Each structure stands twice: as structure tokens, then as C-alpha cells.
Image: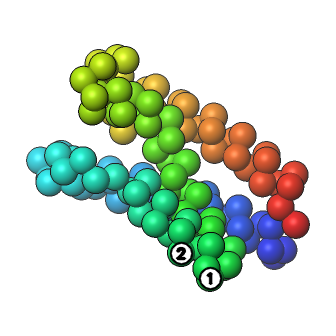
Amino acid sequence: MKEKQRFLLVFLLTILITRIIVFFIPRTSFIYTDQFHHSYFGFMLLIVYIFIKNYYLLAVSLGLIIDQITQAPFYIAHLIGKGLAQPSFWYYWSNYTLISTLIIVIISVLIMWKYKK
């Protein structure tokens, strides 16, 4: 398997595994109420990547970030009290989030496939 294919596989598996883990976490868990998201881990890993330069670490960090990027504007607006939509619209398992994340993943894969060496 080529390096580009392994990179994409790790990227996609990161999103899939994250979705599966979150699906099985009970809705009463602190994870749903603590305001700490897995995209934060993605940003931390991205900073680590700057120093380590491991492409698989980059794939994992991008997967964690991309999985939540479409929710960011709604979440930030919600934090500052200027809600753009009801939370049920942009929560993790809403139709909006699932469809928009799928679109972003497809766009990301196409971009990575085209520009990754």
C-alpha cells in the first residue's frame, strides 16, 4: 500500500473509530456535558506534528478536527450567547452534522488525494 493510501486510511479510520466510540458513550456521561471536544485533541496533535513530522500523526489529528469542523461556528456562537440555530440542529448526531461532515470528508479526501505526495 502506498504512503498516500495509508495516510487516507488512517484519516478515515480516525473519523470512523471516533464516531463509533462516541456512539457507545451513554448520553448521561460527563463527555456530553464537559464542553471538551475531540477536535481539541486534534489541534494538540497538530502542534506535536509540527515538531515530530509523522504523517500518521497528521492523519489522526486532521481526522479528529475534520470530524467536528462543521459544528464549530454553531458551537462558538452558542458559547457567546448568539446561537445561530437550536443545539438540536448542530449536535453531534444530527442530520446536519452527519451530512456536512460526510461532505467535508469527501472534499478532504479529494484534496489529499490530489496534493499529497
- Residue 5: give x, y in percent of width and height: 78, 66
Taking 109 as reference, is 71 above or below it? above
For this view, does 110 lie left or right of residue 53? right
- Residue 49: give x, y in percent of width and height: 60, 73
Closer-to-camera residue (5/82): 82
Q: Residue at x 34, y 52 (%)?
A: 37
- Name the amino acid type tagged 1: Ile
Closer-to-camera residue (77/1): 77
- Name the amino acid type tagged 2: Val
Numbered circles on residues, count: 2
For this view, does 56 lie left or right of residue 65? right
Taking 47 as reference, is 23 above or below it? above
Q: What label does residue 28 carry, if any?
A: none
Q: Residue at x 80, y 74 (%)?
A: 3
Distance between the alpha carbons at the discs numbered 1 and 2: 6 Å
- Residue 115: give x, y in percent of width and height: 86, 55
For this view, does 82 lie left or right of residue 4? left
Q: Are marks 1 and 2 in contact (CB under 8 Å)?
A: yes
Q: Which residue is mark 1?
A: 52
Q: Please identify the quadrant where the N terminus is shown.
A: bottom right
For this view, does 81 lie left or right of residue 62? left
Q: Residues within 10 Å of mark 1 (few under 14, many from 20)?
A: few
Residue lying farthest bottom?
52
- Residue 85: give x, y in percent of width and height: 34, 17
Judged from the image, the secondary structure of the residue bearing numbered disc 2 is helix
Regarding residue 5, the answer to whether it shows in the image is yes
Regarding residue 90, the answer to whether it shows in the image is no
Residue 105: quadrant of the picture: top right
Q: Residue at x 46, y 26 (%)?
A: 96
Taking 41 as reference, is 98 above or below it? above
Judged from the image, the secondary structure of the residue bearing numbered disc 1 is helix
Q: Which residue is mark 2?
A: 48
